[in-house]
Image: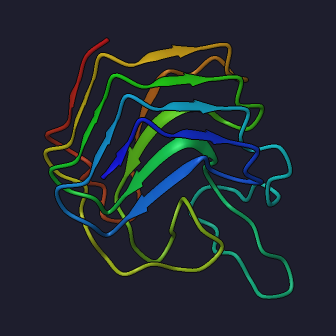
Amino acid sequence: MIANATVTGANDHGILVQDTTNTVIENSFITANGIAPHPACPFGTPSTPSKPCIAANYEVLLVGTSHALVKGNTVSFNPADGGIAVADDGPANPGAPNPGTPHQSVANIITNNLIENNIPDVAYLLLRTTLARARAQWVTS
């Protein structure tokens, strides 16, 4: 559980949750992360040791995560990719420079978050990876 935290100044994601179940991120202030990110790599193109890259760089990124609850957070001023994203994990890991273990993202709840002033101005994004099954997510404002 991440609750009532201030997360700021991270090079890449403010919070990266990967290959877990029943994670809770609530009532936290997640701002000004992604300040010195890895270079972006084309989605689906793997990172290499000589040229590490990250496909998606959000303030909050759930990768291969199921039954997570993300609620009541303020997510703002991220100069990388935007607010909150959910993706499957696999050979093309969208959140890290190394391939991941295949896990679907299923039944995550993302609700009642204030998302503002991110660059680009993306609030929520469901990414499709090689598993192409990031599904059954519940997202509300």
Q: Position of residue 12 (x, y in %)?
A: 70, 53
Q: Position of residue 120 (x, y in %)?
A: 69, 23
Between residue 71 and residue 96, name the one nearer to us: 71
State whether residue 1 is above or below residue 141: below
Q: How are the colours assigned in the image?
A: rainbow
Which residue is pictured at 69% across the width and 56% down the height? 42
Measured as percent of width and height from the top left, residue 23 is found at 25, 54
- Which quadrant of the figure contains the C terminus? top left
- Looking at the image, which is closer to me, 13 or 124? 13
Query: Which residue appears farthest toward the bottom when viewing the image?
Result: 49
Q: Residue at x 40, y 73 (%)?
A: 90
Q: In this view, does 99 lie above or below 31?
A: below
Quarter of the view holding residue 105: bottom left
Instruction: Name the residue: 74% across, 44% down.
Output: 34
Q: Which residue is drawn at 66% across and 36% down?
A: 81
On the image, which quarter does residue 131 sit in? bottom left
Quick one: which residue is furthest to the front in this view?
A: 4
Number of marks in picture:
0
Left/right placement of residue 22 relative to residue 39 reads: left
From the viewer's perspective, tell me whether residue 33 is left or right of residue 128: right
The answer to whether 44 is drawn above or below residue 116 in the figure is below
Q: Nearer the viewer, residue 75 or 133?
A: 75
Position of 82 with respect to 120 (left or right) is left
Relative side of 108 to 8, left or right: left
Residue 129 in which image quadrant: bottom left
Q: Is residue 116 above or below residue 106?
A: above
